[in-house]
Image (cartoon, grey):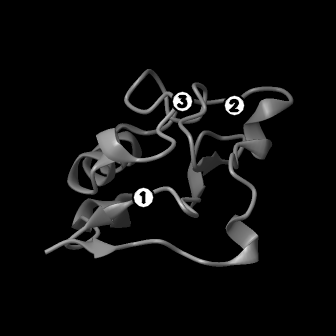
């Protein structure tokens, strides 16, 4: 059984959330632990079938602007935005706590 993980909130209305790294670029790369957590999140929650999965699993999550991943200027993941993105799964992977 798949439980939809759609979040409904005006805060998530902005589809791409990479504002912190777009003007000057990220100053550091995302840590291996954060990258692996995001990859597990993608794999466990049907990332291949999301409505928007631009750039996922390609290079650095912050520098390459993985869709829905918000980062600070130090390359840390600070937010995930998946409003109406068809994210489904049984549960959010435990690795997400590494973000």
Secondary structure beneath disc 2? loop
Q: Where on the picture, by quarter, is residue 98?
A: bottom left
Q: How far apart, in angstroms, are the residues tagged by discs 1 and 3?
A: 28 Å
Q: Which residue is mark 2?
A: 26
Q: Are marks 1 and 2 in contact (CB under 8 Å)?
A: no
Q: Position of residue 68 (x, y in %)?
A: 57, 49
Q: Quadrant for the N terminus, please.
A: bottom left
Q: Residue at x 47, y 38 (%)?
A: 53
Q: Residues within 10 Å of mark 1 (few under 14, many from 20)?
A: some
Q: Position of residue 20 (x, y in %)?
A: 77, 44
Side (left or right) of 40 relative to 74: left
Q: How far apart, in angstroms, are the residues tagged by discs 1 and 2?
A: 28 Å
Q: Which residue is mark 1?
A: 86
Side (left or right) of 69 relative to 15: left
Secondary structure beneath disc 3? loop
Q: Where on the picture, by quarter, is residue 86?
A: bottom left
Residue furthest right in the image? 23
Q: How far apart, in angstroms, are the residues tagged by discs 2 and 3?
A: 7 Å
Q: Which residue is mark 3?
A: 29
Secondary structure beneath disc 1? loop
Q: Are marks 2 and 3 in contact (CB under 8 Å)?
A: yes
From the viewer's perspective, is the residue at label 1 or at label 3 nearer? Answer: 1
Residue furthest top in the image? 59
Q: Position of residue 94 (x, y in %)?
A: 24, 68
Q: Residue at x 75, y 26 (%)?
A: 25
């Amino acid at each position: 059984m798949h439980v939809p993980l759609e979040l409904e909130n005006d805060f998530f209305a902005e589809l791409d959330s990479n504002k912190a790294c777009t003007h000057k670029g990220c100053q550091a790369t995302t840590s291996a632990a954060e990258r692996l957590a995001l990859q597990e999140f993608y794999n466990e929650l049907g990332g291949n079938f999301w409505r928007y999965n631009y750039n996922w699993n390609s290079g650095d999550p912050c520098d390459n602007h993985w869709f829905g991943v918000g980062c600070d200027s130090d390359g840390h993941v600070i937010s995930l935005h998946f409003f109406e993105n068809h994210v489904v799964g049984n549960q959010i992977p435990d690795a997400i706590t590494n973000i």
